[in-house]
Image (spheres, grey):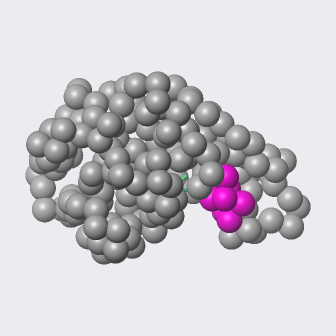
Amino acid sequence: MKLAVFASGTGSNFLAMLEDEGIKDKIELLVSDKPDAKAIQTAKEYGISFFSFDPKDYENKAAYEREIKDLLQDKAINFIILAGYMRLIGHTLLSVYEGKIINVHPSDLPNFPGKDAIGQALRAKVKETGVTIHYVDAGMDTGPIIAQEKVAIQEEDSLETLMARIQDVEHRLYPKVIKQLMEDL
Ligand code: GRF
C-alpha cells in the first residue's frame, strides 16, 4: 500500500498519521496547493517527499491534476488521503482514483458540507456536530460515508474550543479508519 496525503494548511491530521507507526511507512508523498503550508515543513521533518504547486501557474484544474496524476502513477500510489485539502478533486484524478480517495470533514455530514463547517454548526445553534470520513466524489463532501462520530456542542463553545474537540476526534478516528481500509484492501 502506497499512500499520498493532500493538505493545504496546518496538516495536524497529516502529523497524526505520521505519528502512527502503522501508517507512517506507507506515506510516500505529500501534495499541497499552498507552497508555504505548514504541512510541507512537517513532510521535510519526517523525510517525506512532497510536491507543492500554485494553481495560478496552470491553465486550469485539469492541467495541474495531470501533473499530480503522473507523479502519483510514477510512485505507484494506490490510495489518496485528503487532510485539509481545500479543493474539489476533478475528473482527471477521479477517473483514475475514484473509490481510492478519502476525506475527513469536520461535521456530521450531510449536515454542514463545504467551508467553515464548524462555524456553520455554531451559527445553526445545533446541539451536536461531528467528524465524518467519506469517499470523495465530484461533489462537495457528498461521497459515501465510511465512518462518523458525533461531537456535542456546549453552550459556551467558541469556534476555537469546538474546533479543538473536533480535531481531537479527527486525530484519533482518521488514522484508525485508514488502517482499517488498508487491511481490507
Ligand atoms: C480538518 O478539520 C478537516 O476536517 C478539514 O480541514 C481541517 C484540516 O486540518 N477537512 P489540519 O490541516 O489537518 O490541521
Give the image location of residue 26, x and y in percent: 34, 47
Between 127 and 175, the residue placed more toward the observer is: 175
Give the image location of residue 12, x and y in percent: 50, 64
Q: In screen coordinates, is 128 left or right of 80? A: right
Q: In which quarter of the image is residue 160?
A: bottom right
- Residue 168 lies in the magenta-colored region: yes
58 to 111, vertically: above or below = below
Give the residue displayed 23% in from the left and 61% down from the top. Answer: 49
Give the residue displayed 47% in from the left and 54% down from the top. Answer: 21
Asked whether residue 33 appears in the rendered view, the answer is: no
Which region is colored magenta?
Answer: 163-169
120 to 81, vertically: above or below = below
Between 86 and 12, the residue placed more toward the observer is: 12
- Report the predominant secondary structure element of the magenta stretch: helix
Give the image location of residue 125, x and y in percent: 80, 52
Asked whether residue 170 appears in the rendered view, the answer is: yes
Between 116 and 34, the residue placed more toward the observer is: 34
Between 172 and 40, the residue placed more toward the observer is: 172
Give the image location of residue 24, x and y in percent: 40, 54
User: Quadrant where the C terminus lies?
Assistant: top left
Q: In screen coordinates, is 93 left or right of 147? A: left
Give the residue displayed 63% in from the left and 59% down from the top. Answer: 167
Q: In screen coordinates, is 119 left or right of 116? A: right
58 to 181, vertically: above or below = below
Give the residue displayed 37% in from the left and 61% down from the top. Answer: 8
User: Quadrant where the N terminus lies?
Assistant: top left
